[in-house]
Amino acid sequence: MRYLVLPEGSDLPDLNAASNYLLSAYEVDPDRAACLSNFETALLMLYRRTGDLTVLAETVRAGRAAVAASPAGSPGLASRLNSLGGALRFMFDRTGDPAVLAESVQAARAAVAATAGRGAR
C-alpha cells in the first residue's frame, strides 16, 4: 500500500523489488496461478507509475499465464480473467490494436461466465 501514499516516483525501487520477489515466488509455489496473478498486479502498478510499454507487455503475459495456470472451475479463475481483461484494456489504450480489445472483451465475458452459478457472496 506504500504505492498509494508515497510521492510520485519515490516508490519505484519498492515496486521493482516486489515484482522481482513475486517473479521468483511463482516459479516455486504450488499455487502458481495465484502468484502469477499477484505478479501481474505488481507489474500493472509499476506500469501505471512508469508508463513503460515493455512493463505493460510483461503484465499481459503474466495475466495470460495466470489464467492458463488456473484449473477449470478454480475459484480464482474469474478474478484472474477479470485482471487480464483490465491489463488488456490498458494495452489497447496504448496501442489501439483492435485484436487486443477483442481479447479484453473475451476475457471479461469469460470472467462473467466463470461466476455463473456461484450465487451472491
Image: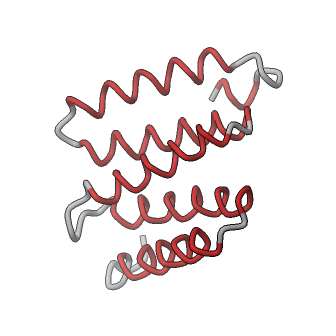
- Residue 100 vs 94, above or below: the answer is below
Residue 49 image position (x, y, % from top left): 73, 33
Q: Is residue 43 left or right of residue 24?
A: right
User: Residue 93: which quarter of the image?
Assistant: bottom right
Q: Residue at point 25% right, 54% down?
A: 69
Give the side of residue 106 with respect to residue 86, left or right. left
Image quadrant assignment for residue 73: bottom left
Q: Nearer the viewer, residue 80 or 115?
A: 80
Give the position of the C terminus as an image quadrant.
bottom left
Q: How is the image coloured?
A: secondary structure
Which residue is pictured at 52% across the width and 43% down the height? 41
84, 101: nearer the viewer: 101
Q: At 42% from the left edge and 46% from the top edge, which residue is drawn? A: 62
Residue 74 is left or right of residue 101, and the answer is: left
Q: Quadrant of the N terminus?
A: top right
Is 67 situated above or below 109? Answer: above
The number of numbered discs placed on residues in the rendered structure image is 0
Residue 116 in the image: x percent, y percent? 36, 84
Q: Residue furthest left?
A: 30
Q: At x 35% / y 52%, what residue is drawn?
A: 66
Q: Nearer the viewer, residue 88 or 99?
A: 99
Q: Position of residue 23 (x, y in %)?
A: 38, 29
Q: Is residue 103 above or below residue 84?
A: below
